[in-house]
Amino acid sequence: MPWPRRMVYSIFFLPLLATIVSAQTNSSESQPATQEIKYGGCLEPPAPDAPPSMCVPALAKNENDAVADAAVKPTAKIDLVVPQGSTLRIALDQRTRISHPGDAVHGKVVEAVYAFDQPVIPAGSVATGHVIKVDGVTAVRRTMAYTNGNFSPFRKYEVTFDTVTLPDGRQLSVSTTVSSGTAEVVHLVSPSAQKQKSASQRATDAGKQEVKGKIHEAKDQVHKSWEEVSEPGKLHRLKTYLVAQSPYRHQYIEPGTRFNADLDSAISFGEIQRTSDDLTALAGALPPNTTLKARLVGEVSSATATRGTRVEAALTEPLYSPTHQLILPVNSRIVGQVVQAKAAHKFHHNGELRLIFERIEIPAEAERAAAETAPPKLVAQNTAANQARPELTHRGNVRMTGNIEGVEVDRRDHMVLDEEGGARTTDSNTRYLSTGVAILLAAAASHTDSEHGTVDNAGDPGVRTAAGGSGFRLVGALISLGAKSQPVSIALGVYGASSSVYTNFLSRGHEVVFPKDTPLEIGFGSPHSAASQAKP
């Protein structure tokens, strides 16, 4: 065939040849796929005795990625539960008269309540309840009150809170056991914690003072002094004091009185999911100079505690790392012991108490979640070692020691914290002044005005009134003034002086008592020398 004709035929059959080759290729690729579907993912029919797992269909690329992600980041479901015994700290926002059971009480939650690491009852939630019990007054207590000019002695009472209204309007029905109210709560801070104020903050404060100048600083001081005098809280306390001098008065629970309400049953808020990334830092090393907020699980008193007595506190706020990874969930147990306890004794020697905290135990729920999200190799190691709850006892090779850096107590306890977090009770220096004045009034009541050239043998009316008031308050003052009798004035003055001497100098001192649920701030760092070598 001549070559021009061959070229024409080649050009004509070339597209047809490409189509035939393409069809053969597609046929060969589709046949294994059809066989794979026919034999359940296998390219060949499996042997009759082959196990089902011998042939697994290949996964798509996105399915492989999903399985890989699930293997790398396993998740755990965690129940958001506020357990039984957890504490709601509630402050009354209305004045409530104590007259009979059933009187309503109304307050607000002052500290957020957490479940695991989530706030579930925010601060500011409204708590309502009622008075459930008003005790009578025994004959002995009534007699002692009458001798001090108080004809309406204090009656013990009990309250309960049964409803909590969240800021979003949801209402929670709760059952609580409530401790005695604290009228005036003070927040004590150890001197060592005060010294940890940041250098930047100190520089800022110094700059402000330098800009103000001496004149502005003096004006601010005058304004501050006036605010302290005219502050509603202090004026209210002055009114309360004046009313307390009256022989007859109603009993009230004042606004601001704080109660610790322990839950009688748990409250559930659903559940959350956490991955291994979320729990990477769980039960890890504490950051330097960490301060934990906690509450005491049980009462500790200098009267009953001894060296080595176990002390436990429950974490009330979660702790996060600087990268915002959870280290400690709430309800982690901070375990320690009493290293010094000195009971109060006669001649007004007050008690002393010192605690240290040595390790932290995470809750069982957190331990379970960590085990579920841990890599299989780590789980096998923990199982082989038969480890119990993870405990934080070291940071690297340095032993961690926790000391009390802050505590909330009743103002009437007259408690102070030292450099190492040890607590002791103190006496006001006014006890010397008050006792001296009472003695002088008793002595002055024994002198008549006739010694000064006057005719009133009963003595100066002002001295008589003051002498009677030192012994029996307002009632004694009125009796001494109206009786116009020197022996009566002397008797009332001597009673007041002797009572002041006994109370301020001869009686038993005050114990250091941390009641159950006392809020604590525990600082963790290197052990203090005084804390680790405390006196027995």
Image (tube, grey):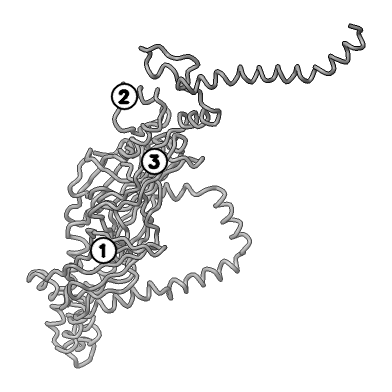
Task: Give coordinates of residue 57: x percent, y percent.
Answer: 48, 23
Q: CA distance from mark 2 to mark 3?
A: 22 Å
Q: Quadrant of residue 534?
A: top left
Q: Quadrant of residue 98?
A: bottom left
Earlier-in-chain disc, 1 versus 3: 1
* Residue 328: mark in rendering: 3
Q: Secondary structure at mark 3?
A: strand
For badge 3, the amino acid type reads Leu
For badge 2, the amino acid type reads Thr
Q: Is residue 513 at least partly visible in the picture?
A: no
Q: Nearer the viewer, residue 193 or 256?
A: 256
Task: Give coordinates of residue 459: x percent, y percent.
Answer: 19, 86
* Residue 383: mark in rendering: 2
Earlier-in-chain disc, 1 versus 2: 1
Quarter of the image with the N terminus in it: top right
Q: Secondary structure at mark 2?
A: helix
Residue identifier under label 1:
162
Q: Nearer the viewer, residue 38 or 17?
A: 17
Q: Please tell me whether residue 484 is drawn above or below residue 131 in the rendered image.
A: below
Quarter of the image with the C terminus in it: top left
**Residue lying at 30% horizontally and 33% vertically, measured from the top left:** 389
Looking at this view, name the residue that lies furthest to the front. 1
